[in-house]
């Protein structure tokens, strides 16, 4: 049986007619064409499918799309604003925070969520927050460096001393 749901995804309103058991990751990828969100483990432990649902990071591979009815969702495609990369995205480029790219969207979503919740995390807090995002290429050093760089960039922008 299909259900009508409404989602605001990356600032755009959508009305969808979807099967009751459609996973949010599949809805985003196949119904909306937003393929940046990846499905890695299918059980909610790797972080590749992370999205922000009403500002909270969730695993979209274990979340039903019907449960998101009326919600606002931010995917990796919605992080950049006005053609400008988010500081986390730029830091991942500048500091080699990605290798094969499978985990990268989830890593960036997680790092953005961290900065949304804690604008001045310590390295230990970053490590703890990012623990739920697995990288099979063992790129953790580059990921940590990227997130810490994004923290510094965000702090500089907030204090007005950024470029």
Image: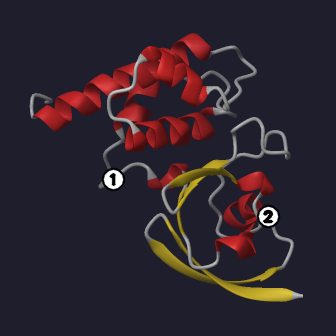
Where residue 101 sits, quadrant-wise, is: top right
Mark 2–mark 1 distance (CA, rounded to whole Å): 27 Å
Q: Which residue is mark 2?
A: 23
**Residue 145: where, in percent of width, then height?**
45, 15
Drawn side of residue 116 relative to residue 45, left or right? left
How many other residues sit within 10 Å of disc 1, few (<14), some (14-19) or many (≥20)?
few
- Sequence-first disc among 2 and 1: 2
**Residue 12: where, in percent of width, then height?**
47, 73
Q: Quick one: SS at disc 2?
A: loop
Quadrant position of the C terminus in the picture = top left
In this view, the residue in front, 82 or 152, is 152
Above or below for 102 versus 126: below
Drawn side of residue 39 relative to residue 83, left or right? right
Most distant residue in the left direction = 160
Kindly tell me whether residue 128 is visible in this rendering. Answer: yes
**Residue 78: where, in percent of width, then height?**
46, 55
Residue at (70, 60) in percent of width and height: 29
Most distant residue in the top direction = 141
Q: Which mark is residue 10?
A: none
Drawn side of residue 85 relative to residue 12, left or right? left
């Amino acid at each position: 049986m299909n259900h009508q749901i409404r989602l605001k995804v990356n600032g755009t309103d959508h009305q969808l007619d979807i099967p009751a058991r459609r996973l949010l990751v599949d809805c985003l990828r196949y119904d909306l064409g937003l393929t940046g969100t990846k499905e890695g483990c299918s059980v909610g432990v790797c972080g590749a499918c992370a999205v922000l649902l009403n500002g909270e990071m969730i695993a979209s591979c274990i979340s039903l799309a019907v449960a998101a009815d009326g919600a606002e969702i931010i995917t990796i495609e919605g992080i950049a604003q006005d053609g400008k990369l988010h500081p986390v995205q730029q830091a991942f480029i500048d500091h080699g925070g990605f290798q094969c790219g499978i985990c990268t969207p989830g890593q960036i979503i997680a790092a953005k969520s961290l900065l949304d919740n804690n604008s001045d995390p310590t390295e230990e807090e970053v490590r703890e927050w990012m623990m739920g995002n697995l990288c099979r290429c063992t790129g953790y050093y580059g990921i940590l460096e990227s997130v810490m760089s994004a923290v510094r960039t965000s702090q500089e922008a907030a204090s007005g001393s950024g470029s």
